[in-house]
Image (cartoon, rainbow, N blue to C red):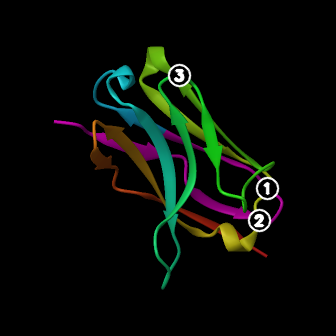
Amino acid sequence: QVRLVESGGGLVQAGGSLRLACAASGSIFSFNAMGWYRQAPGKQRELVATITNGGGTNYADSVKGRFAISRDNAKNTVYLQMNSLKPEDTAVYYCNALRYGNNYWGQGTQVTVSS
């Protein structure tokens, strides 16, 4: 069974930084891709960033140049470095893993950016 556990969320002032981590229960090589999504109150869940098994990355336009996704294969962990945070980045951030059409989700971690 796949288990994804997020950590690193919290409260930060605008302009600050946070680093989220997503630890997988098994080897992340088994996933075609991993990523981060977020959901703000009253809004749909949206893609933030993804990283493929080969290291290719993709970002939402709203976070390009501010966020960076990376992976540590030895630790079975994917990270999201978030810089220059804005109040509109406030949301629950979810880790996602994709394996041959099957999506797996973590429980989410709250990120709150105060103005």
Q: Which residue is mark 2?
A: 13
Are the residues tagged 1 and 3 within 8 Å (C-beta)? no
Mark 3 nearby-residue class (10 Å; few <14, some 14–19, many ≥20): few
Query: Which residue lies at the image location 72% right of the left edge and 73% below the top edge?
Result: 87
Q: Earlier in the sequence, mark 1 or mark 3?
A: 1
Which numbered circle lies on residue 64? none
The mark total stands at: 3
Determine which of the numbered discs, if any, sits on residue 16 in the image. Answer: 1
Q: Position of residue 104 (x, y in %)?
A: 29, 47
10 Å crowding of disc 2: few (<14), some (14-19), many (20+): some
Magenta residue span = 1-21
Q: Residue furthest bottom?
A: 42
Q: Which residue type carries mark 1?
A: Gly
Q: Are marks 1 and 2 in contact (CB under 8 Å)?
A: yes
Q: Is residue 103 magenta?
A: no
Structural distance between the alpha carbons of marks 2 and 3: 34 Å
Q: Nearer the viewer, mark 1 or mark 3?
A: 3
Residue at 60% across, 30% down: 56
97 to the left or right of 67: left
Front in this rendered view, residue 41 or 101 = 101
Query: Within 10 angstroms of label 1, few (less than 14), some, or many (20 or more) residues?
Result: some
- Mark 1 to mark 3 CA distance (whole Å): 30 Å
Nearer to us in this view, 44 or 4: 44
* x, y percent for residue 115: 79, 76
Q: The residue tagged with tag 2: helix, strand or loop? A: strand
State the residue lying farthest toward the front: 101
Q: Is residue 41 above or below residue 83?
A: below
Comparing labels 2 and 3, the label whose residue is closer to the camera: 3
Please determine whether, in this image, residue 26 is positioned above or below residue 35: above
Q: Secondary structure at mark 3?
A: loop
